[in-house]
Amino acid sequence: MQIVLVRHGKPRIDSSRISAENLGSWAAAYKRASIDPALPPPSKARELAEAAAYTLSSDLPRAVESLRALAPARSAPAERIYREAGLPRLPASRFALDPQLWALVSRVGWFLGFSGSTESAARARVRARSACQELTALAAAHGSVLLVGHGIFNGLIAWELLSTGWRGPLWPSGSYWSAAVYRKAHA
């Protein structure tokens, strides 16, 4: 059995410097963003998608569009359970930084237990466990599955896969269009 976790393509979004209090509105725009058509998927990701017996994605636009770019002829479900974990709000700051840097600061706080009004890391791990069970069932039924998801949530799924006997990378790459392959012998 094989499960492939692919991170979506690069979103088309303004990444001008912002203050910490604007991270929420930037994250909302990121959530709605489509992918940049100037940066198509690499051939390795396309080959993995073509070889997969079953494909699916998160229901966020960047994941749905990425799967469409990887396997345009396929009809594939898009499911909420595979969405990226939310970013907690940061305290106000007068500094303007790259939004990805603010997102990193926010994510570190999230992993340390600060979630504010967003899903906590503990709740996201529970959701990742459910996602792992679904993907494992799909792999048992179809042999190979490819999921187009998101950086952090794909990593949480990977931890769950590894804890249940799958073999593959400890943490998938955070690069856009990256693919991590997990394998397990049939039980």
Image: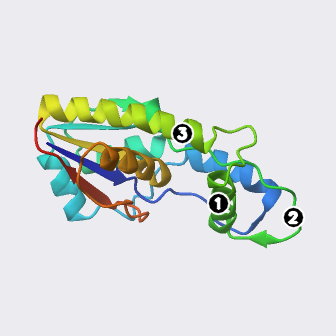
Q: Amino acid at mark 2?
A: Ser
Which residue appears at 68% of the width and 39% of the height? 118
Tell me which corner region of the image, top left, top right, bottom left or bottom right, holds residue 119: top right
Q: Between residues 85 and 67, which one lies in front from this camera angle?
A: 85
Q: Residues within 10 Å of mark 3 (few under 14, many from 20)?
A: many
- The residues bearing labels 3 and 2 have C-alpha atoms spaced at a distance of 27 Å
Q: Would you name the residue on which mark 3 appears?
A: 124
Quickly name the residue at label 2. 93
**Labelled disc at residue 108:** 1
Q: What amino acid is found at the position of numbered circle 3 in the picture?
A: Ala
Q: Is label 2 in a helix, a strand or a loop?
A: loop
The image position of residue 147, as x and y in percent, is 31, 43
Of the residues under marks 3 and 2, which one precedes in the sequence?
Answer: 2
Do tag 1 and tag 2 residues touch (Cβ < 8 Å)? no
Label 1's element?
helix
Label 3 with label 2: CB-CB less than 8 Å: no
